[in-house]
Amino acid sequence: MSGIVEWYRDLMDKGQDPRTVGWFLVPSPGPTLTIVVTYIYFCVSAGPRYMKDKKPYDLKNTLIVYNFIQVLLSLYLVYEGLVAGWLNDYNFICQPVDYSYNPNPVRMARAVYTYFICKLIELLDTVFFVLRKKNRQISFLHLYHHSLMPVTAWIGAKFFAGGHPTLLGVINSFVHVFMYTYYMLAACGPHMHKYLWWKKYLTVIQIVQFVIIFLHNIQMLFTSCNFPKPLSFLLTLNALIFIYMFGSFYVNNYVKADKQREPKANGCAIANSVAANGLAANGSAANGSAANGSASNGSAANGAASDLFYTTSKNDMDHGKFD
C-alpha cells in the first residue's frame, strides 16, 4: 500500500505540467471525479426521482443563452488552438509537449485548461434533459461521452497542457460550434425546425472527427516521437470506441429508420391513390352530397396527416444530443 501511495504522489508531483500547478481543480483528480460521479447519480437516479411528480421546467430562454455561450466558447477554443500551435508551429506527425514558458506554449496551456472547464460546463446538457423530463434522451452513449470527457480533459490540463493531444480539442470544439448552433436554433421553437434538416449530418461530422483523432494517434505508436505511447494508445482506443458507438447510433436512428419509413410511405401513396380514385368516382356520380362528404373526409384525413407529420418532426427534433 505504501508503494502505491508513493507512486501516486510521485505521479502527481513530478509528472505534472509545471505551468498549471495550483490552477483551480487541477492539482488533484478528486474534485473532478466527485463532480462526474455526482453528475451520473443525479442524471440516472436523483434527478428523475425529483422530477417524477413535477411538470417539466420551461427552460427555453435558458437554453438559448446557454447554447449561445457554448458557441462562443467553442469558437474561442478553435481560434486559440490554431493560433497557439496548429496553424503554423505544430507538426501533425509528432508534436511533443513544450513545457516552456514561452508565449505560445503558455497560451496553449491556457486553452487546454479552458477546454477542461468547458467539459465540466457541458454536463449541464444532461441536467437540462432531466429538468425538462427528456429522460429518453439520456442514453448510455450520452452519459459515457459526457462523463469521460472531463476526466480526459483533466489529464491534459494536469500533465500534457499542449502538444499532440490538443488537436482533439481543436477538432472537437470546431464540431461543437455547429452542434450548439443547432441546439440554440432548435430551442427557439417549432418555427425553426424546418431550417434544421441537417441534424443527422452532425453525427456524420462526429464520426469523421473520431476517425481523424484515431489516425492522428495510432501512427504515434509506430514512431519515435517524444510523447508517451500509453497515452497515444488510450486516445486511439477511445476514438475507436466512439467511432463504433456513434456509428451504431447513426445506423439505428437514420439508416434503419429511413428503411422502416419507406414501406409506410409507399403504403400511404397507394392508399391516397385509391382514395383519390374513389373520390373521383364519387364525384362523377349524380349524388353531389356524397361527393361533398368524400371531400370533407379527405380534408380531415389531410389534416390528420399534417398533425402526424408535425408530431413526428417535433419528436425527431427533440432527440438526444450527440456530444
Image: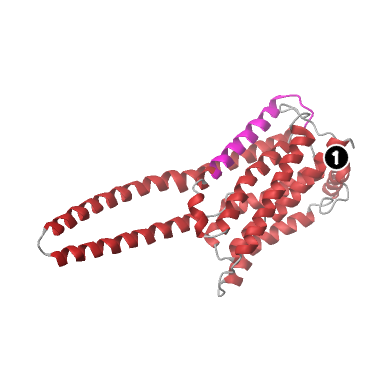
Q: Nearer the viewer, residue 219 or 11?
A: 219
Q: Position of residue 66 (x, y in %)?
A: 67, 57
309 relative to 290 in the view: left or right? right
Q: Residue furthest left?
A: 286
Query: Quarter-wise, where is residue 309 in the image?
Result: bottom left
Above or below, 4 relative to 279: above
What amino acid type is highlighted by mark number 1? Val
x, y percentage for residue 148?
67, 49
Q: Secondary structure at mark 1?
A: helix
- Residue 109's x, y, as percent? 82, 41
How packed mark 1 is, by other alpha carbons closer than 10 Å (few <14, some 14-19, many 20 or more), is: some
* Residue 9 lies in the magenta stretch: no
Do we see residue 138 in this rendering?
no
Tell me, what colour scheme is on the image? secondary structure
Give 66 or 13, whichever is nearer the viewer: 66
Q: Which residue is mark 1?
A: 106
Q: Is residue 11 above or below residue 93?
A: below
Magenta span: 202-227
**Image-quadrant location for residue 170:** top right
Q: Position of residue 202 (x, y in %)?
A: 55, 44
